[in-house]
Image: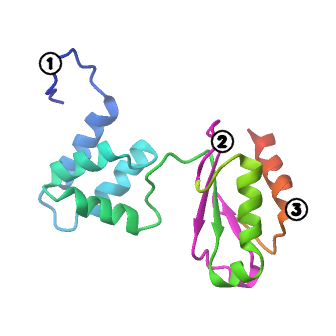
């Protein structure tokens, strides 16, 4: 990895791996999404410095990279917790109380909105549909679906995962 700073630089192994990923897809049509997936697997999310490196490496505008990252829900701009809570706020879930469940999760986790807890154990992300409307309101934690929820279910669910560590 080349260093453009005048100070002593410590080589970042993740940055070196990102360079390899970009190099692998350079000059491949439609490379942006596969590179973003691999970069997110590497970093856990897609911070701005990673997006800039991808834009520079693939020769695409940073605005295009950012547009793709913010359009597709599988990409994240912030770190995710060990337990990733996706809470559906789509119509079916919302009319059955998902907004109250979202508020309870924020309260129990100490979050102001979508984000990650200070201990890195939980991340909360609202989404528009999980695809389990018949179980509304629904959340998914690391792929496990919880349906027909009420706000009082939230502390028990959080405790289950806290106990798992």
Q: Position of residue 47 (x, y in %)?
A: 38, 46
Helix, strand or loop at mark 2: loop
Marks 1/2 in contact by CB < 8 Å: the verdict is no
Instruction: Tell which tag, 1 or 2, sits nearer the viewer.
Output: 1
Q: Position of residue 7 (x, y in %)?
A: 19, 16
Marks 3/1 in contact by CB < 8 Å: the verdict is no
Q: Is residue 33 above or below residue 7?
A: below
What residue sits right under mark 2 in the picture? 121
What residue sits right under mark 3 in the picture? 152
Depth check: 113 or 67 in front? 113
Tell me which numbered mark, 3 or 2, is placed earlier along the sequence. Answer: 2
Q: Position of residue 39 (x, y in %)?
A: 35, 49
What numbered label is drawn on residue 6?
A: 1
Q: Which residues are magenta?
A: 115-143
Helix, strand or loop at mark 3: helix
- Indicate left or right for 79 with 139 as reference: left
Say few, some or many: other residues with alpha carbon within 10 Å of mark 3 (under 14 / 14 to 19 / 20 or more): few
């Amino acid at each position: 990895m080349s260093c453009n700073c005048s100070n002593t630089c410590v080589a970042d192994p993740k940055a070196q791996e990102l360079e390899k990923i970009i190099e692998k897809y350079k000059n491949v049509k439609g490379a942006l999404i596969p590179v973003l997936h691999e970069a997110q697997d590497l970093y856990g999310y897609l911070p701005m410095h990673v997006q800039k490196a991808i834009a520079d490496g693939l020769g695409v505008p940073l605005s295009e990279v950012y547009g793709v990252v913010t359009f597709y829900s599988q990409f994240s701009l912030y770190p995710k917790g060990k337990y990733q809570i996706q809470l559906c706020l789509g119509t079916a879930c919302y009319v059955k109380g998902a907004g109250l469940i979202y508020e309870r999760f924020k309260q129990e986790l100490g979050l102001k909105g979508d984000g990650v807890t200070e201990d890195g154990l939980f991340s909360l992300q609202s989404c528009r549909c999980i695809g389990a409307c018949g179980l509304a309101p629904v959340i998914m934690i690391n792929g496990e679906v919880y349906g027909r929820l009420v706000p009082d279910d939230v502390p028990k669910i959080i405790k289950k995962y806290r106990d798992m560590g």
